[in-house]
Image (tube, rainbow, N blue to C red):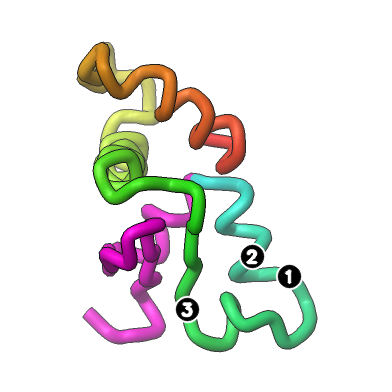
């Protein structure tokens, strides 16, 4: 996969997730950061840092992005969420507009 086809998402702890750009574009917020006109650092470097989102939550979000690409066409599947992650995931999803 070419570098320009990937995006690096960085958690609060500094852990880096390199994911397919199409998957990252599931998030309206990330899409805006990467496609807005101008010379924003996120667009130039293909990196987005989330200082308020933990590694555990960002990993689950990345999983959701891929799940959404695969199953958004209406297949009847559920995305598994551990109960202890629910509140943090809801807050992150609200921020990311997913």
Apparent side of residue 71 relative to residue 7 in the rendered image (left or right): left
Taking the image as shown, residue 53 lies to the left or right of residue 6, namely right
User: Residue 6 lies in what quarter of the image?
Assistant: bottom left
Point 27% across, 36% down: residue = 67
Q: Is residue 93 above or below residue 25?
A: above
Front residue of 95 and 20: 95
Contact flag, marks 2 and 3 (Cβ < 8 Å): no
Q: Earlier in the sequence, mark 3 or mark 1?
A: 1
Q: Which residue is mark 3?
A: 46
Using the rendered view, name the quadrant where residue 70 is placed: top left
**Residue at (67%, 59%) from the top-left corner?**
32
Q: CA distance from mark 3 to mark 1?
A: 12 Å
Specify the segment rendered in magenta: 1-26
- The residue at which mark 2 appears reads as 33
Left or right of residue 73: residue 47: right
In the picture of the structure, the residue carrying the numbered disc 1 is 36
Task: Pick the quarter of the image with the N terminus.
Answer: bottom left
Whether the residues at callouts 2 and 1 have beta carbons within 8 Å, the answer is yes
């Amino acid at each position: 996969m070419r570098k320009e086809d990937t995006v690096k998402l960085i958690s609060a702890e500094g852990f880096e997730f390199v994911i397919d750009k199409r998957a990252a574009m599931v998030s309206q917020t990330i899409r805006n950061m990467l496609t807005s006109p101008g010379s924003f650092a996120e667009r130039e470097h293909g990196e987005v840092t989330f200082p308020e989102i933990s590694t555990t939550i960002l990993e689950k979000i990345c999983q959701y992005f891929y799940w959404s690409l695969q199953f958004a066409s209406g297949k009847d599947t559920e995305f598994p969420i551990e109960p202890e992650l629910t509140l943090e995931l809801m807050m992150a999803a609200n921020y990311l507009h997913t």
